[in-house]
Amino acid sequence: MANPPEWAANGIRVGLAEAGYVEGRNLSIISRSAEGQFSRLRALAADLVGNDVVVILAGGSPVPARVSKEATTKIPIVFAYGGDPVADGLVDSLNRPGSNITGATFIGTALLAKRMELLREIVPWAIDVALLVNTNGTLAERQIADATAAARELRQRLHVVEINNDGDIDTAFERMSQLKMDAFVISTDPFFGMIARDRLAELALRYKIPGIYNGRDESKVGGLVSYGPDKADTWRQAAVYAGRILSGERPSNLPVVQPTKFEMIINLKTARSLSLTISPTLLGLADEVIE
């Protein structure tokens, strides 16, 4: 349902290969992208159903999977995204998905409080903290509530900053600078992780505002610190499920895959550029330190 970035596409290739499927040899892939426009998803889902595909792999957010589920009750659907598939209405339960859908989640939306705690350790003087959200998506409301509660516990003031498209990114950082934000937190949303990733890291450095990100790939391109599971592995696991379904298994018998390991990546080069000193204790806890 979407054209994934290379890290996700590679995870899909690896997962399918693990299940015994290689594109061009024993597998054909039809790819469709809504290019961030949810209004196009129903037509794309109908197109895939009309092409009699054997499995639909729907990623990025719960919406492609939900629309696919509305389009067909027969074709198996596998999702890969960062929310709660029970709360999002995709499955009956994690252990027993039910119907024709299952998948993998990196539950990024549930990690906001932990990320804010880590950011406080790195920027202990941070009082005014911005939460970057995409209100055009479907994952914002719950994360705003969680971040508000976390900020209250940390005695911080939370400022919700909307970034709904490319044009909002520069404006958001200008606003954060004018409001003298001490730090920012990026919410889990496919727009931030797949489209705006590099620009967010670039502007954070330009405006000298420290932020915490959702995964390794964001720290690799200059993000100060990230905390979360390996998102590429979530896509790999979803692709493994797609392969198992191609081999005859039923999605209703495949429990939703959840991450078991979370990693913290610190970009020490970025920390120096922001004039931040990371404690030896925190550096010792990091799974990787980028010099």
Image (spheres, rainbow, N blue to C red):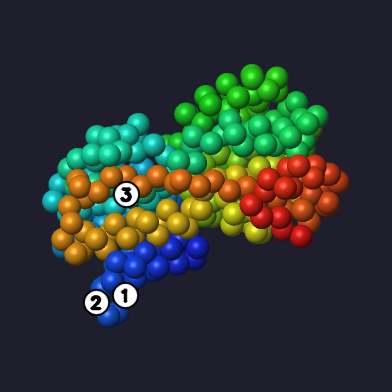
Q: Do the residues labelled 1 and 2 touch (CB within 8 Å)?
A: yes
CB contact under 8 Å: marks 2 and 3? no
In the image, 207 versus 187, the foreground residue is 187
Residue 195 in percent (x, y) is at: 54, 55
Q: In x, y percent, where is residue 269?
A: 78, 56
Q: Residue at x 27, y 35 (%)?
A: 93
How far from the left and from the top, in percent, is residue 97? 24, 41
Q: Residue 22 carries which label?
A: 1
Work out whether residue 136 can be spotted.
no
Q: How many marks?
A: 3
Q: Which amino acid does label 3 sit on?
A: Gly
SS of the residue under disc 2: loop
What residue is pinned by disc 3? 103
Q: Is residue 279 left or right of residue 262?
A: right
Q: Which mark is residue 26?
A: 2
Of the image marks 2 and 3, the number of the one nearer the N terminus: 2
In terms of depth relative to the viewer, which is nearer, 219 or 247? 247
Q: For the residues labelled 3 and 1, say whether their Cβ atoms are less than 8 Å apart.
A: no
Q: Residue furthest right?
A: 275
The secondary structure type at the circle numbered 1 is loop
Quadrant assignment for the N terminus: bottom left
- For disc 1, the neighbor class at 10 Å (few under 14, some 14 to 19, many from 20) is some
